[in-house]
Amino acid sequence: MAFDLVQYFAEQIHIQKPELLNQYQSSERKAHLAEINTLSLAKLITLWRKDENKLYQEIQSQEQLYIIDVARHLTTSDQNHSTLEKAEFEHTITEVLSLQLAELKQLDDTGHYGIKGLRELITGQVEHLSGQAADWIWSTSELIELKGSKPIPEEELSLEETMKEFNQMVHQSNIIEHHEQVTEVEKTVVPTWAKILEPVVALAILWILYSAATQMFA
């Protein structure tokens, strides 16, 4: 498994770029930066796949015009559903792209990765990115293989809703049980007319037996 650049870049953004989106609350700022960090890295993966030689050269040269062009393309994409204003989004992703390319160059210089080593490092980030962001990020970066990878959280029921469902279940169960009991009683109840005819039937049986006995001993 390749070294996790997602977390590494996130830490470097926190250390090197504390001014980015600092007008937002901590949790909101963290969420926006996580999206942009993910989007930027995902775009680097697709750029590498399209032309690894060109991107490797851009990593070495750190050409600002190239970075601005990529950032603008991501900002103006129809697939970009970031809630940030366009201007602050473009500024932020330009800064993040610059940082990522600078860090990749430093890793290459110190680790002597070369184009083959960076290929494994960059393309190996797909497994680290999987499930980390909403689909618009994968559509915007064109890393569409990761669409649908983010788990959809199950809706949490409140205690009140849970108890309501439980009470409904118990109530329904009681209705069914009562219905079954009534049905069983109805099956076993002897009709009133049967009770009235019981003595008559008994007398008829006795009369038949008496007649038979009289004829036998006549």
Image (spheres, rainbow, N blue to C red):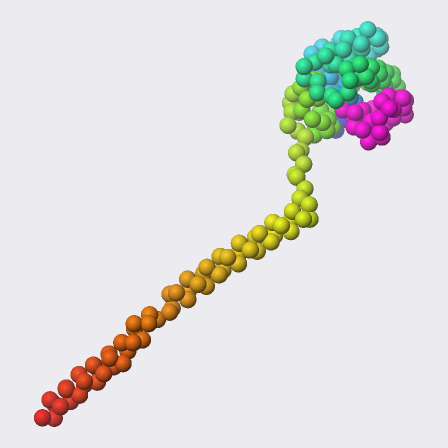
Range covered by the magenta-colored residues: 6-35
Q: Nearer the viewer, residue 87 or 143?
A: 87
Q: Quadrant of residue 99?
A: top right
In this view, the residue farthest toward the left is: 218
Question: Is 120 displayed left or right of 189 in the figure?
Answer: right
Magenta region, mostly helix, strand or loop?
helix
- The residue located at (33%, 70%) in the rendering is 191
- The residue located at (50%, 57%) in the rendering is 175
Q: Nearer the viewer, residue 139 or 4?
A: 139
- The residue located at (68%, 42%) in the rendering is 156
- The residue located at (53%, 56%) in the rendering is 173
Please tell me whether residue 9 belongs to the stretch shown in magenta: yes
In this view, the residue farthest toward the top is: 65
Q: Position of residue 65 (x, y in %)?
A: 82, 6
Residue 181 versus residue 59 in the image, above or below: below
Q: Nearer the viewer, residue 79 or 204?
A: 204
Q: Quadrant of residue 204?
A: bottom left
Which quadrant does the C terminus fall into? bottom left
Please tell me whether residue 32 belongs to the stretch shown in magenta: yes
Q: Position of residue 146 (x, y in %)?
A: 66, 25
Q: Position of residue 123 (x, y in %)?
A: 73, 20
Residue 43 versus residue 217 in the image, above or below: above
Which quadrant does the N terminus fall into? top right
Q: Position of residue 81 (x, y in %)?
A: 70, 20
Using the rendered image of the protein, determine whether residue 121 is visible from the camera's viewpoint.
Answer: no
